[in-house]
Image: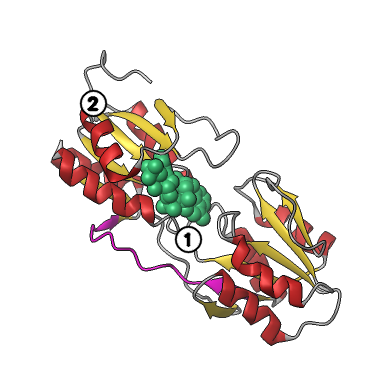
Amino acid sequence: MTTGSRAKPPVLILGGTSEARALAAALEAGDLAVPVTSFAGRTESPAPVPGDHRIGGFGGPEGLAAWLVEHRITALIDATHPFALTIGDNAVTAARTAGIPALRLTRAPWTPEPGDVWIDVGDEGEAGNAVLAQDPPSGTTILVALGAQRLESLYPAVRKREDLRWRVRVVDPPASPYPSQAMTPIIDRGPFNAEAEHFLFEREGVSVVLARNAGGDASVAKIVVARRLGLPVIMIRRPASANPQHACHSVEELEDQLRRLL
Ligand code: NAP
């Protein structure tokens, strides 16, 4: 990563999301700041991002603060996924330690629309229990669109209903086999459009969707198709963030804030 030689001040974007990429593209094209995007390194090959980038954890808030100082970063933008909580808290602490502003860019959550059949749950474990409570007939296909991070909490429900087809959509093949043959991966990377999702639902015979209220456009198509087909969506609500910052919901709003601060 190189940041020193250009006139624009460097800012760190904590990324791994489509909005982080959009922000990096906007900053790279404009005259406000040089974007440096940080990836956790969870996916084997993160999609290319405009500007500079780095990969891997920092070693907690202290490590992040030290990195900010070492690289003379002038503002920290947390544009991580709304379900990534630790790094958001670390960002606030580290920016305070380094004496630079911290901003937050995140997607607005989805809200139910007419035709939606949402079952509101708090986490993956509750999502599994909600499937059991529905008592779906044997052979029912469930699209598990929960990412790869916290799938273990779903395992007890899968073990209780191994007669169901738990189709798990993930970016990379699982590092170790799932604990049940009823659970099988669909390896794919968004964004997904409604036509492709409709095709997937028909091909797999999807009857139930497990999703997280991620918000944004990149992964909303499954919700749109479920609405169209009248299928239930077991929806994990947004976790409460300890991050007190005002969240910008658009790149433009974030850039306005940044312009005032730099
Ligand atoms: P997390 O629980 O909030 O963070 C765990 C640790 O991972 C952090 O303490 C930090 O390690 C490291 N980390 C997280 N994001 C990082 C980043 N952008 N750059 C460098 N290090 C980072 O996060 P998570 O839920 O595991 O998510 C990891 C990454 O995947 C995030 O960047 C997020 O945007 C992306 N992502 C997450 C989800 C999800 O469902 N959670 C979905 C899509 C994308 P250190 O303490 O060592 O610094």
User: Observer-nearest residue: 192 or 14?
Assistant: 14
- Give the residue displayed 81% in from the left and 74% down from the top: 140
Q: Could you tell me if residue 137 is visible in this image?
A: yes
> Which residue is under mark 1?
215
In the rendering, at what x and y percent does residue 91 appear? 28, 47
Residue type (three-letter) at the residue carrying disc 2:
Glu
Q: In which quarter of the image is residue 8?
A: top left
In the displayed structure, 90 sits above or below 52; it is: below
Secondary structure at badge 2 equals: helix
**Secondary structure mostly taken by the magenta-highlighted segment of the chain:** loop
Q: Left or right of 256: which side holds 123?
A: right
* Of residues 228 and 74, the one drawn nearer to the viewer in this rendering: 74
Of label 1 and label 2, which has the lower sequence position?
A: 2
Image side of residue 49 versus residue 220, left or right: left
Q: Mark 1 or 2, which is nearer the eye?
A: 2
Q: Going by the image, does 211 lie left or right of 4?
A: right
* Secondary structure of the residue carrying numbered label 1: loop
Q: From where the camera sits, is residue 80 visible?
A: no
Q: Going by the image, does 77 lie left or right of 154? A: left
> Residue 241 colored magenta?
yes
Pointer 2 residue? 70
